[in-house]
Image: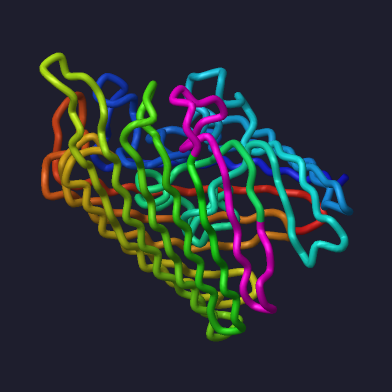
């Protein structure tokens, strides 16, 4: 059993200076490092892993803002568990692997652990366009030396227990070449509470470009839609909500210890289904990373978000169209793979 872990903390400053009374003293549209004008714990994590041979298991315990925002206040979603699943990899099944339990989504260009992303803050697409996790069964199977296909049967989005009795189907594909990697994910299934009527669809794709060892870039696109089905008292609302966005990011490993990264996004939420407000929102993030030693890194980040409406909180209760933040993050991690 491999044991690993990390501690991720930061100090953030928001030039709008939102207060506790306005929005809980938080950066709007952020997650995990959302609390501002203070020191905070983004995440403390402990991981236990045994690769399948042919049976394996994986458990991620985590605490801090990451746990609060991923699992929410419901005890049905696995408090303090990011992942917990068992694996089976039959020796004669030509690479087939089966996992059952709670696992993070296959969608998106970023992950929950900040050290494995290029920027310290997560993108708008990661926070508002895709799910965090699923509960159920997933499979992956190499179909060639460079292509892997997978099928998932899960309870829906961010659910360990579901209220509608339906299942969501996920289809995944990863094409890995020396100079690029192309991932495509599709999820479809009922996601409205207490009914199997009204489906949610998500198409997610990321093209990662790796022309050399120092410079990388990616393009991430998401399109989602959700068909409502609930009683308004005057009839059944079956309106269709949809959202979409695109992100571009680059990273340059300048030296053995220093790296620079930049990200730009555009997100369209015409029905206010994801962010709660009908808006077009954009963001640009610049990040400097310095590795102090194996297992210890810091990041300094400047980020600008802006919308076409007055969405971002300012002071005690005002709203403006933009938000600028500055963040310093420190991540310490240990384990067999650092």
The residue that appears at 41% across and 58% down in the rendered structure is 204
297, above or below 175, in the image: above
Res. 237 image quadrant: top left
The residue that appears at 69% across and 40% down in the rendered structure is 100
Residue 209 vs residue 7: left or right? Answer: left
Residue 121 vs residue 137: left or right? Answer: left
Q: How is the image coloured?
A: rainbow
204, above or below 100, in the image: below
Res. 255 image quadrant: bottom right
In-front residue for pair 210/165: 165
Residue 14 vs residue 205: left or right? Answer: left
Residue 247, given in percent of the width and then of the height, sits at 35, 63
The residue that appears at 21% across and 41% down in the rendered structure is 240
- Quarter in which the N terminus is drawn: top right
Residue 14, given in percent of the width and then of the height, sits at 31, 41
- Quarter in which the C terminus is drawn: bottom right
Residue 165: in magenta span: yes
The residue that appears at 42% across and 41% down in the rendered structure is 189
In-front residue for pair 255/269: 269
In-front residue for pair 146/227: 227
Residue 23, given in percent of the width and then of the height, sits at 28, 26
Task: Tally the numbered discs.
Answer: 0
Residue 190: in magenta span: no
Q: Residue furthest top?
A: 233
Residue 232, given in percent of the width and then of the height, sits at 17, 19
Magenta residues (range): 140-167
Task: Give the prevailing secondary structure in the magenta stretch.
Answer: loop
């Amino acid at each position: 059993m491999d044991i690993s872990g990390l501690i991720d903390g930061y100090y953030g400053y928001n030039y709008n200076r939102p207060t506790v009374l306005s929005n809980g003293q938080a950066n709007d549209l952020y997650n995990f490092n959302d609390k501002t004008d203070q020191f905070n714990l983004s995440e403390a994590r402990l991981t236990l892993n045994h690769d399948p041979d042919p049976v394996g298991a994986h458990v991620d315990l985590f605490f801090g803002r990451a746990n609060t925002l991923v699992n929410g206040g419901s005890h049905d979603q696995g408090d303090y568990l990011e992942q917990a699943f068992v694996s089976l990899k039959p020796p004669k099944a030509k690479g087939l692997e089966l996992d059952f339990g709670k696992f993070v989504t296959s969608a998106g260009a970023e992950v929950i652990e900040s050290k494995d992303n290029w920027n310290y803050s997560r993108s708008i697409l990661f926070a508002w366009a895709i799910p965090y996790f699923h509960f159920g069964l997933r499979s992956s199977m190499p179909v060639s030396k460079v292509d892997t296909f997978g099928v998932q049967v899960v309870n829906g989005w961010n659910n360990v227990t579901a209220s509608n009795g339906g299942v969501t189907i996920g289809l995944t594909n990863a094409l890995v070449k020396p100079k690029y990697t192309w991932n495509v994910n599709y999820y479809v299934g009922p996601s409205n509470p207490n009914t199997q009527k009204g489906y949610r669809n998500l198409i997610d794709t990321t093209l990662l470009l790796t022309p050399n060892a120092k410079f990388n870039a990616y393009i991430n696109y998401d399109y989602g839609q959700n068909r409502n089905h609930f009683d308004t008292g005057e009839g059944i609302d079956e309106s269709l909500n949809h959202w979409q966005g695109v992100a571009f990011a680059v990273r340059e490993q300048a030296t053995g210890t220093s790296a620079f990264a930049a990200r730009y996004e555009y997100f369209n939420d015409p029905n206010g289904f994801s962010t709660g407000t009908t808006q077009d929102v954009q963001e640009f993030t610049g990040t400097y990373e310095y590795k102090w030693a194996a297992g210890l890194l810091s990041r300094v980040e400047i980020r600008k978000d802006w919308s076409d409406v007055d969405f971002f909180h300012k002071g005690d209760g005002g709203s403006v169209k933009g938000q600028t933040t500055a963040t310093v993050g420190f991540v310490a991690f240990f384990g067999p793979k650092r």
